[in-house]
């Protein structure tokens, strides 16, 4: 996934790294640092603008004209009224997009307009009807293998945002790919490795099912953290009411999936 590379001259001692930027570009840089694994669609007037490496990426993927905001700063943009079409194309190409909107009337702004990331759009978290195929459920899944070996059993959590369904699954050894193909998720979360490489078992799933992969911090899959996340979200002291024991292996992917949804569907914070 793309990230913006800072190739500017390092700031002098006591000087902010963004001090040479305009207020709007400092705001852009701050949101980009908050969402480094996303292409940032940044609302400026009647357009959503992309800058730097994001601009080069959408130029390649969407065929947008590449211009410059200032010398040495690539820029590309899409009309705000057509943004859903471009979002669909980015998601279909396998990218994540953070949409940063103006949350203040520019006429009322005293200085820079307040903006916020109002949604993070990923293959498995689409809920907008304009981006979905009505005939196919759009499901997000998280997986965790519970045994060593290429043909090991696994556990998975699956959510469908438009209907609010949330289910847990045990995937038998030797049938993990078949079961995931049957479930048909659009996006699959897995525990990030120390070297950042995709584990061979996960790569094999992606090759067979064509699902979009998203690495997540390994700690989010740990039983203790996952269990605490679920209890806090559902405001319960025990998960017995859901038919789960404290050591149920499906809690790992369930907690990881829930944390991902909390991040991507969080209420926007102005900046």
Image: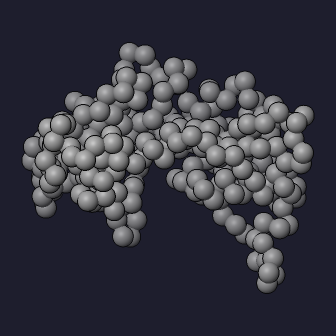
Q: Residue at x 76, y 77 (%)?
A: 10
View extreme (front): residue: 237
Give percent across and percent down for residue 67: 82, 46
What percent of the width, then of the height, locates residue 86?
63, 31
Q: Pick out the residue farthest to the top.
A: 135
- Horizontal arrangement in the rendering, residue 103 relative to residue 3 (left or right): right
Which x, y percent locates residue 127? 48, 27
User: Which residue occupies the extreme left position in the image?
Assistant: 173
Q: Is residue 135 left or right of residue 87?
A: left
Identify the image quadrant of residue 244: top left
Q: Residue at x 33, y 34 (%)?
A: 159
* Color theme of the render: one colour
Q: Is residue 17 visible?
A: yes
Q: Is residue 198 above or below residue 195?
A: above
Residue 68 visible in rendering: no
| Count of numbered marks | 0
**Foreground pick, 242 / 59:** 242
Residue 109: x, y in percent? 87, 41
Residue 254, image quadrant: top left
Seen at 85% across and 48% down, the residue is 112
Q: Which residue is at a point 62% across and 26% down the rendered structure image?
A: 85
**The image quarter in which residue 5 lies:** bottom right
Q: Is residue 230 above or below residue 186?
A: below
């Amino acid at each position: 996934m793309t990230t913006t590379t800072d190739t500017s001259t390092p700031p002098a001692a006591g000087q902010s790294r963004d001090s040479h930027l305009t207020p709007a570009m400092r705001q852009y840089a701050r949101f980009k640092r908050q969402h480094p694994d996303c292409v940032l669609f940044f609302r400026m007037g009647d357009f959503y603008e992309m800058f730097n490496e994001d601009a080069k990426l959408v130029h390649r993927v969407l065929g947008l004209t590449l211009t410059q905001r200032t010398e040495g700063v690539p820029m590309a943009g899409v009309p705000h009224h057509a943004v859903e079409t471009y979002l669909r194309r980015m998601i279909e190409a396998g990218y994540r997009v953070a949409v940063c909107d103006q949350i203040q009337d520019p006429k009322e702004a005293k200085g820079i307009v307040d903006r916020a990331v109002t949604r993070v759009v990923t293959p498995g978290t689409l809920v907008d009807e304009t981006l979905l195929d009505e005939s196919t459920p759009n499901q997000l899944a998280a997986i965790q293998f519970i045994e060593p070996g290429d043909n090991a059993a696994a556990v998975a959590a699956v959510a469908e945002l438009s209907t609010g369904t949330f289910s847990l699954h045990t995937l038998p050894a030797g049938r993990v790919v078949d079961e995931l193909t049957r479930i048909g998720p659009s996006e699959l979360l897995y525990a990030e490795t120390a070297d950042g490489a995709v584990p061979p078992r996960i790569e094999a799933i992606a090759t067979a099912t064509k699902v979009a992969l998203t690495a997540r911090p390994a700690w989010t899959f740990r039983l203790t953290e996952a269990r605490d996340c679920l209890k806090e979200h559902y405001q319960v002291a025990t998960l017995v009411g859901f038919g789960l024991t404290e050591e149920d292996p499906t809690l790992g992917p369930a907690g990881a999936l829930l944390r991902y949804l909390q991040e991507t569907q969080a209420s926007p914070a102005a900046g």
